[in-house]
Image: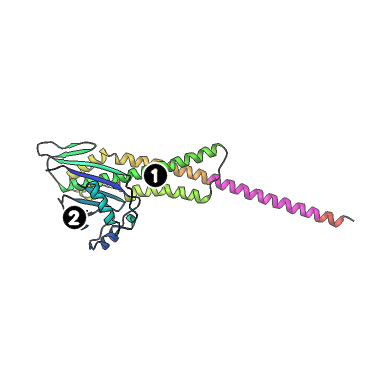
Amino acid sequence: MQPITFTAFALDGELELNRLASRLNISRKYRWEEPMRLNPVTFTPASDGDDLQVYLYSFGALVFVNGSDELVGRFIDGISQYADSLKNRPQLPYREEYRLEIDPQQPATFGNDSAIMPEYNQIYHDIICLVIAQSVALERIEERTDAVLDEVEGLIARLNRGKLELPDRDLARLASSVLGFKYASVAHIMVLDKPDITWNNAAAERFYLTMAGLFELRPRYQEIKHKSETLLGVTDVFANLSHARRSARLEWIIIILIAFEIVMALWQQYLTVSP
């Protein structure tokens, strides 16, 4: 049996699978944790064992099975007329690859780039797709989290110089970005959730845990969680400083108004008693 290649890409946004299914005349309803499997040439539902497949995940990841770069390009061009998030052809900078070899003479072996199994099983096929889809989606979040960290470092440097001119809109944007990272990594990428098949299939569970360990899904999620909590803490500090500065301004305005009222009163009294 020829080696099976898997190539995963992360998109910029989510995929609405049920809307896409409707536009492709697919009657099936997809749960949020279920991928859509298509033939990348005909855009029809794929079956177990098909040589060419593409898995589409709602959290914004595509996994091509035995798909060449040319096939990937043609699929993206074709599916863009059905999927709103693909209207403008994405650049797909986030990419993950893996290979599965079937060799009855070899024991099960796992590596960072490939695995060898003594026999083919569709369950293993599905698990590899899920894990590398989670991995490439995490890579997207990791890069965006680091970009926000860099931005916050610049704000901290300005604060060290005694400058803090950050509008509430920017503070809200930072907080929204951080919360978005946490929500995407937990709710959508499902890093902490095992596939349903692993609950009643011990072999599938061992395979999933091995693959998830190879791609360090849980440690990477914990790192994103830690960075997100740090960013939220820094954002809270900036928000408190901004509110304190605004309160100080209001207090000075009140003091100035009171002083103005006193001066006006004294002036009026002076005008009254003067000849």
Q: Which of 79/21 is in front?
A: 79
> How far across and how far down the image is residue 167, in percent?
53, 49
Task: Residue 25 in the image: state x and y as whole percent.
Answer: 23, 63
Task: Classify the position of the N terminus by image quarter.
Answer: top left
Q: Which corner quadrant of the image does residue 143 belong to? A: top left
Give the CA distance from mark 2 to mark 1.
Answer: 33 Å
Q: Are marks 2 and 1 in contact (CB under 8 Å)?
A: no
Counting residues from the start of the chain, the first of labels 2 and 1 encountered is 2
**Hey, what amino acid is under mark 2?**
Ala
Q: Residue at x 57, y 41 (%)?
A: 163
Horizontal side of 134 relative to 245 (left or right) equals left
Residue 109, percent from left and from top:
17, 36
Whether 175 is drawn above or below 103: the answer is below
Quarter where residue 270 is shown = bottom right
Q: Residue at x 31, y 41 (%)?
A: 218
The number of discs equals: 2
Indicate the colouring scheme. rainbow
Query: Tag 1: residue type?
Result: Arg
Query: Label 2 neighbourhood size at 10 Å, few (<14), some (14-19), many (20+)?
Result: some
Residue tagged 2: 46
Where residue 107 appears, as percent x and y from the top left, is 13, 36
Task: State the image quarter where residue 226 is shown.
Answer: top left
Q: Nearer the viewer, residue 167 or 50?
A: 50
Q: Quadrant of the C terminus?
A: bottom right
**Start-end of magenta stretch:** 240-267
Q: Secondary structure at mark 2?
A: loop
- Disc 1 designates what residue? 144
Asked whether 219 falls inside the magenta stretch, the response is: no
Query: Is 249 in the magenta?
Result: yes
